[in-house]
Image: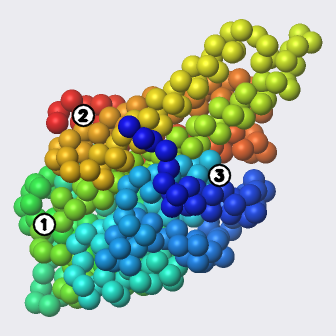
């Protein structure tokens, strides 16, 4: 089987690499994180000009093609440079839900501005007691005539403080964990009764806790049919899971590379520590973990692009996330330990990469969760 990149994928990869070399040095990234928005608006506009915001979308929606493999090519490079721009919450999660559920009028009014870099979005789906279960939804949506009243709260809503609109997962009917009865609504960020409490995650990305106190929105703000949004949400989250797994693979390979480089310059007992056989074995194990993780992420992306059943696709995604989680633990911890105390300082990018992959390990379900999910499918 040929795993080499197509000409378009190679061009996409080189496009990201050139941007990073020119605009995303370590010090520049630190300034971006310290800003109020937590991302660079100038960079986001450049993303739009370069066509990166079109990659996850199908051609009929005005996109690049919508291939999961194309997406992993770009996310891999994002991981290597540890980008903090809100690509996953705005484009992959929110854009994916709009592309899957919205009618033509809603799509034309949302996807165009999104791909032009003029619309920031956030997806509010996780709740305090949901524990990675997408069907566990306590936030309610009560229809009153041509209006909908939303009550409840969401946690860890990435990019909520910068979003123009939030995509809110709410329950119109059924019990708290029923698969039926879940809908998704568009809520303007300035809606009355909407409370956004922003904070910065350990990896430097912006998130927020969001509360809904009798937030009233028009019924036309619902995406798709009433109570039938869960399947679309699961599909989009699976794609996002593969995307962040590819991001983790890129970050892990940089952690390995920088660890090997450091071992050649750091001396102990008069010799570079890279000459010590015990450390060579540990770095060889790190290399193996990176290769295993890369292979299984590519397989999962190809499954998503193929004609397999939904169950087989979900199994491939869970297998990838579980394997990547193990690689994160092994490679991340070894990188920090071989670097020693300097690896945990703010002045070295190794510590920042470690924090990012640690956050990815938990995002969309940790290794234990996906191992159990794979076994149950």
Q: Is residue 93 left or right of residue 20?
A: left
Residue drawn at (21%, 51%), measured in percent from left and top? 307
> Badge 2: how crowded within 10 Å, few (<14), some, or many (20+)?
some
Q: Can residue 230 be seen in this view?
A: yes
- Quadrant housing the N terminus: top left
Q: Name the residue under label 2.
A: 374
- Check the image and report above or below for 295 versus 89: above
Q: Is residue 367 left or right of residue 82?
A: left
Q: How far apart are marks 1 and 2 (CA)?
A: 24 Å
Q: Which sits in the foreground, 325 or 293?
A: 293
Residue drawn at (79%, 45%), measured in percent from left and top? 347
- Kindly check if marks 3 and 1 are in contact, taking CB atoms under 8 A apart as contact: no
Quick one: label 1 or label 2, which is nearer the N terminus?
Answer: 1
Q: Which numbered disc covers residue 351?
A: none
Image coordinates of residue 139 in percent, x first then y, are 23, 65
Quick one: label 2 or label 3, which is nearer the N terminus?
Answer: 3
Q: Mark 1 points at which residue?
A: 228
Q: Distance between the residues labelled 2 and 3?
A: 31 Å
Q: Which sits in the foreground, 26 or 183?
A: 26
Nearer mark to the viewer, of 3 and 1: 3
- Check the image and report above or below for 186 versus 329: below
Quick one: label 3 or label 1, which is nearer the N terminus?
Answer: 3
Q: Quadrant of residue 103?
A: bottom left
Q: Which numbered disc covers residue 81?
A: 3
Q: Which sits in the foreground, 314 or 9?
A: 9
Q: Quadrant of residue 229?
A: bottom left
Label 2's element? helix
Image coordinates of residue 348 in percent, x first then y, are 76, 42
């Amino acid at each position: 089987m040929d795993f080499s990149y197509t000409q378009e994928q190679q061009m996409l990869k080189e496009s990201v690499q050139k941007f990073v070399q020119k605009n995303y040095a370590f010090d520049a990234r630190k300034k971006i994180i310290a800003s109020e928005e937590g991302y660079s608006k100038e960079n986001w506009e450049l993303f739009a000009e370069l066509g990166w915001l079109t990659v996850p979308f199908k051609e009929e929606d005005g996109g690049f093609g919508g291939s999961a493999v194309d997406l992993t090519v770009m996310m891999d490079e994002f991981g290597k440079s540890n980008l903090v721009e809100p690509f996953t919450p705005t484009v992959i999660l929110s854009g994916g839900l709009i592309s899957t559920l919205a009618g033509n009028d809603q799509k034309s009014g949302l996807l165009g501005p999104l791909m032009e870099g003029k619309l920031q979005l956030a997806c509010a789906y996780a709740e305090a007691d949901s524990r990675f279960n997408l069907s566990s939804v306590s936030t309610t949506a009560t229809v009153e005539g041509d209006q909908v009243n939303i009550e409840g709260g969401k946690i860890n809503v990435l990019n909520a403080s910068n979003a123009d609109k939030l995509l809110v997962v709410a329950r119109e009917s059924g019990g708290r964990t029923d698969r039926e009865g879940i809908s998704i609504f568009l809520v303007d960020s300035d809606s009355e009764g909407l409370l956004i409490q922003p904070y910065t995650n350990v990896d430097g990305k912006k998130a927020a806790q969001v509360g809904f106190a009798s937030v009233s929105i028009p019924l036309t703000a619902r995406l798709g049919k009433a109570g039938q949004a869960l399947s679309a949400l699961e599909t989009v989250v699976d794609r996002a899971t593969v995307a962040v797994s590819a991001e983790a693979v890129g970050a892990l390979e940089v952690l390995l590379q920088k660890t090997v480089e450091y071992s050649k310059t750091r001396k102990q007992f008069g010799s570079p520590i890279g000459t010590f056989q015990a450390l060579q074995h540990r770095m060889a194990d790190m290399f193996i973990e990176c290769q295993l993780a890369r292979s299984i992420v590519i397989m999962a992306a190809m499954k998503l692009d193929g004609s397999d059943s939904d169950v087989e696709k979900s199994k491939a995604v869970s297998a990838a996330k579980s394997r990547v989680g193990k690689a994160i633990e092994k490679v991340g911890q070894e990188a920090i330990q071989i670097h020693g105390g300097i690896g945990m300082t703010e002045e070295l990018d190794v510590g920042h990469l470690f924090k990012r992959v640690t956050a990815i390990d938990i995002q969309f379900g940790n290794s234990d969760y996906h191992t159990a999910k794979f076994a149950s499918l």
